[in-house]
Each structure stands twice: as C-alpha cells, then as structure tokens.
Amino acid sequence: MDAKVIGLIGAGHIGSQLARLAVAHGYEVVISNSRGPETLKGLVEELGPNARAANPTETAERGDIVVVTIPLKNIGQVPVLPLAGKIVIDTNNYYPQRDGHIADLDNELATSAELLQRHLPASKVVKAFNHIQAAALTADAQASGTPNRRALAIAGNDDGAKTEVARLIDEFGFDVLDIGRLSESWRIEPDTPGYGPRRTTDQLRRDIAAAQRPHGARPVK
Ligand SMILES: NC(=O)c1ccc[n+]([C@@H]2O[C@H](COP(=O)([O-])OP(=O)(O)OC[C@H]3O[C@@H](n4cnc5c(N)ncnc54)[C@H](OP(=O)(O)O)[C@@H]3O)[C@@H](O)[C@H]2O)c1
C-alpha cells in the first residue's frame, strides 16, 4: 500500500514535527489534539495546503497510516474502530511522573507499545520515533545513503507494517533498525542506552543488545 495521508493523533512536540516531515515529503496530513481543530489553526497554516486539522476520530478515519503521539496516560481515549486494520505508529513513552503509575509497566509485564496494541487489537501497531527528541526529527534528518546517517529503531508484530513504516522513516531521513516484536520494545524505552543519543545503525544495535531491565528480560514471545 502506498500511504497518501498521514494522520496524527497528538499535535505537540512530536506530532507537529512529524507533520512537518510528512508535508515536506509530499504527504497529506490530518492532525488532531484533545482541544479541537480550531486550536490548531496556526500549525495548519504553517504546514500549508496539504494539511488540515480534525478531531481524533476523523483523523483515525482519514489516515492511511496514523501516528498516536500523546501522553501515555491518554491512550485509552484513542478511537478504536476507525483504526482497525490500519498501521498505527506509537511514539509514546512511559513517564510515571506525568502518566501516573501503570502496574504492568512497573512490573515489566508489558511494554508501552503492547498497551497501545491491547487497546487497538485489530490495528498493526509499530513502535517508532520514541527515542529521538522532537527537534532532532528535522535537524538530524539526512538523505538515504549519507555516511553515518542517524538510525531509528522500530518494533512490531506485523512484518508488513514494519516494512511500510521503515520505508516512511527512510524517506523522512533516517536509517532503520528492526528490533523485533512489541514485547522487545522495552530495549528502546526511557533509561536504556539507545534512548536519546544520536546513533548510527551499528551503534544502535549495540545499545539494543546492551539494554537491561531492572527485573530481567522476559522470554521473547
Ligand atoms: N518531546 C519529545 O521529544 C518526545 C520524543 C519521543 C517521544 N515522545 C513521546 O511522544 C508522546 C508525545 O510527546 P510530545 O512531547 O509531542 O507531547 P506534547 O508536546 O505534550 O503533546 C501532546 C499532544 O497530545 C495531545 N493529546 C493529549 N491527549 C489527547 C487525546 N486524548 N486525544 C488527542 N490528542 C491528545 C495534546 O493535545 P492538547 O494540547 O490539546 O491537550 C498535544 O497535542 C509522549 O508519549 C512522549 O513521551 C516525546
């Protein structure tokens, strides 16, 4: 499938930056926040004629690929039915001081991406863009083939969805490292070596291998 419309649920630091990359690469953008489309007038003006604001349900309906980029505590509010069958990119990170405590994450029984997948059982969730600071999404983007290009990790349970998201990330300006299923995405969550710094593919692969969980890794499933 050739995605034409990128939907963004969340229009903050990451949502607005991904919207900028998407319009720069010829996509249509539909973007939403919690307060309503009228509050996104300035951003939509900046993004230009290929962008418009909507509510989250319409964003989910219109997007060929939909990015959920909101505080983790709010993922239960993401519309479920219009995202069935679609690729959903999950940029979200768990910060207990912001999100409150979530027992399955504190006890390492799930990754934050698995929580979104549980909420969206018929969607193809791919973890991506969670370990790069918003400003670097545009500042570090480089054309394919640039030596020592920055790499970003993806994880997901659907190989076809990962292939498509990898293509998008490459188009947006980054090499891609597939780190496995959503259950493995803890390896790129906050407090791991790869979370934050600029890394090439080889460096990121080493960081992923070196990541440790305080309570020990679960068996891969
Ligand atoms: N900032 C970074 O550099 C960075 C990097 C990687 C990953 N992340 C992660 O990516 C996610 C987004 O981060 P951010 O920094 O972009 O957050 P942010 O700047 O605080 O923006 C959050 C956005 O989510 C919207 N939102 C909140 N609840 C919503 C809901 N129920 N439905 C629709 N939209 C909703 C907010 O809309 P309103 O303003 O209208 O409430 C706002 O547009 C977080 O999980 C964060 O941990 C952030």
Image: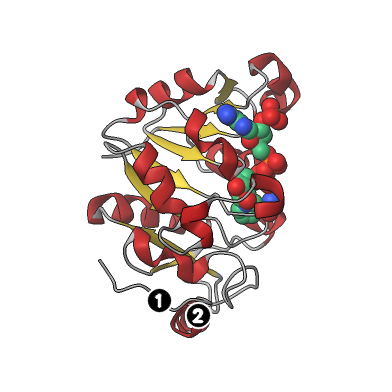
Whether residue 129 is situated above or below residue 212 in the rendered picture: above
Residue 74 lies, in percent from the top left, at: 57, 35
State which image quarter holds ligand 1.
top right
Residue at point 31% right, 39% down? 2
Query: What amino acid type should be assigned to the residue bearing mark 2?
Result: Gln
Q: Colour mode?
A: secondary structure
Query: What amino acid type should be assigned to the residue bearing mark 1?
Result: Ala
Of mark 1 and mark 2, the one earlier in the sequence is 2
Graded by Cα atoms within 10 Å as few (under 14), some (14 to 19) or many (20 or more), the crowding at tag 1 reads: some
Label at residue 212: 2
Q: Is residue 18 visible?
A: no
Q: Secondary structure at mark 2?
A: loop
Q: Are marks 1 and 2 in contact (CB under 8 Å)?
A: yes
Q: Which residue is mark 1?
A: 217
Going by the image, does 94 lie left or right of 45? Answer: left
The image quadrant where one finds the N terminus is top left
Residue at point 59% right, 54% down? 94
